[in-house]
Image: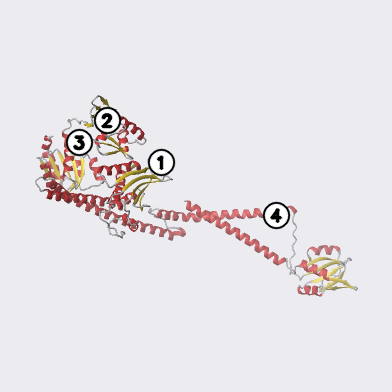
Amino acid sequence: MGGTVRILNRFIGATMLISLSLLVLNFLLLLIWVRTGTVEGNSPAAVVRHTAEGLHAANEGYVLEAETEALLDDQQVWAMLIGSAGQVTWEHSLPDELPAHYSLTDVAKFSMSYLMDYPVFVWEHAEGLMVIGYPKDSLVKYQHILPTDWVKNLPLRALLLLIGNLVLVLIVALIIGSRLLLSIRPLTQGIQALAADREVQLEPKGMLADLAQSVNHASSLLHQKNASLKSRDEARSNWIAGISHDIRTPLSMVLGYASELEEHHEIPPLQRKHAGIIRYQAEKLRTLVSDLNLVSMLEYEMQPLTPKALRLAALTRQVASDILNAGLEPSFTLEMDDINETAQIYGDERLLLRAMTNLVHNAIRHNPQGCDIRLRVDLAEEKHTCRFIVLDNGRGIPPEELADVLELPFSANRKYARPSGHGLGLPMASRIAKAHRGRLMLTNGPAAGLTAELELPCLEAR
Amino acid sequence: MEDLKHKKLLIVDDEYDLREMVEGFLRKEGFTRIFQAATCVEAQRIIRSAKPDLVILDIMLPDGDGFSLLKSLRQFSSVPVLFLSARGEDEDRLLGLGLGADDYMVKPFLPRELLLRLSAILRRVYAPFRQEQRPIFQLGRRVIDLESGIVRTPSEDVSLTAKELVLLTKFYENRNRIVTNDALCQAAWSDDYYGYENTLMVHIRRIREKIEELPSNPEHLLTVRGLGYKLLVKGEE
């Protein structure tokens, strides 16, 4: 909806700008045109003035300067001088049909308009009145008689006219624009729905019918793709679930009989020890099978979450005490660093504990020589995210392998051969973070060791 | 306790070898009256005729699933049921327990764990009159009697308040292990426990005054910095 309003605004703005520039352009052109048409050196007013100035009295007659005479001939203009008594005292190319004497009334009549259809112009001369005449029908004379008020208000009127024009443009643009938008709106809604991954079915009509059909087609294509992707993911996840299910029953037998033999008192100690090894390896297989299943469910977003409000500090203490209670080699230390007590998240307790425990176990497993491990909980300044951080001072991970260790062990995205151990711990933690709309970041510490940060969105304060 | 070994047990699983293995373990532990069934139909027949005292039930069976078998079973019998399944997902576990199963175990399992859980169910169902005794234990020269809520020193008896009793019970259940502040607060003040840390410290100080020779230098109830507390009880693992 916001997009539609924006388009309408743009459209109206552009239309008004175009109209305004057209108006200005027209005005400028008009101005130039009027100037070139009138303010020429040879305008009638200039010619009559020249003629009056170029006619000099000389021994009983008059002499016209040659330059002026040429100008008159060039313009096909006749001229005459009317003396104070009304008689023509000098003339040049005067048509024969014109009288040689003029009364005051005649002068008053022709000075504003025509003398026998000749457009005439007058100028003051020392010896009378200079009159020049242009050929018939060559010029049109208009008189503008305007009230003073009208002239005074002219700027205001012009401004009002301009504003009126703009308002008109605005209304027209609004009408045209909204009609256009009305036909576009279903399309924009359709495209927005496509972006939001909803199914779209537009009715193809009007001038944009083709476009609507294309949108429908794109929607059905997307829908098919999604469905096939989803069914493939489901198939993969079900396949792994099926395998782990089928492994469990035979593994029960291995585990059961091996532990039976291990506890059997009639069997020699060495053989009992071997049975113990079988039992231990079967338990490892059991863990691997259930981890694999969990990671595959997470990978294909099929793992259901049972979320509730949790305090990250409490989870951290539980992880630390569980690991300490299970027994930690003396070469390791596990300590609590800065712990933010208020950071709350909304998540699946069991999965989060799993991810956090995996991160600590990762530090232990990658540093068989022992190391100091510190746990930290912090809350981002804007309070939208919080982090559980595991810092160790061990060997760290080579920088080129950092991105690699979050990939699944058998994935084609993984460049390096995996080290010993099944290597599901970090990929699992990363996927648990993702399922909680968070992320797992691994960095090598400034001095030495690895820093693992589990970033999670905070539970919004109620 | 011995008469629990005379209880009739029924193992329902489609895998013959697994039934044999479980029956072997049970016989070795002294159980004698053990029945087997491979299908839902067979299981129903045996339950009606032999009336077992406990059923070990698989979920995936050739002619149906354990959940619906349990549902139909519950209409005429309240026999305790322990699910033993290769399906390890939480939903299955919750579904099974929600239908009224007494426990849910995931394959593969350790025989010892199966025996422990099975015996726990039998005791709970068939020996209910045995009074659940709260523990009595020794800390240095003092005896902590959680049953009567009293700390006995050579010179006098000191009684424990209700909260101190709750906390000490929690400590004893997790003896020689770290118990976090959060778990302690939750035990004493239930779910909405945030903000009770200072109150917890006060209670811990009072407990120490009652159980330690030198409360300022505790030997039994130790502080684990940043995490919580640990009750050391000698003579046990």
Q: Secondary structure at mark 1?
A: loop
Q: Secondary structure at mark 2?
A: helix
- Marks 2/3: CA distance? 17 Å
Q: Which marked residue is nearer to the observer: mark 4 or mark 3?
A: 3
Q: Is residue A39 above or below residue A70?
A: above
Which label number is shown at residue A461? 1
Q: Is residue A419 above or below residue A67?
A: above
Image location of residue A25, percent across then percent down: 62, 62
Image location of residue B9, percent across then percent down: 13, 40
Q: Amino acid at mark 1?
A: Ala
Q: Amino acid at mark 2?
A: Ile
- Marks 1/3: CA distance? 48 Å
Residue drawn at x 61%, y 55% as measured from the top left: A165
Mark 3 = which residue? Answer: B235
Give the left or right position of residue A107, taking residue B134 as reference. Answer: right
- Marks 4/1: CA distance? 65 Å
* Chain identity of mark 1: A
Give the left or right position of residue A94, taking residue A289 as reference. Answer: right
- Marks 4/3: CA distance? 112 Å
Give the left or right position of residue A391, taking residue A116 as reference. Answer: left
Q: Indicate how the structure is coloured in the image.
A: secondary structure
Q: Amino acid at mark 4?
A: Leu
Image location of residue B189, percent across then percent down: 32, 33
Q: Which marked residue is nearer to the observer: mark 2 or mark 4?
A: 2
* Chain identity of mark 2: B
Do discs 2 and 1 share a chain?
no
Q: Residues within 10 Å of mark 1 (few under 14, many from 20)?
A: few
Q: Residues within 10 Å of mark 3 (few under 14, many from 20)?
A: few
* Chain identity of mark 3: B
Mark 4 = which residue? Answer: A154
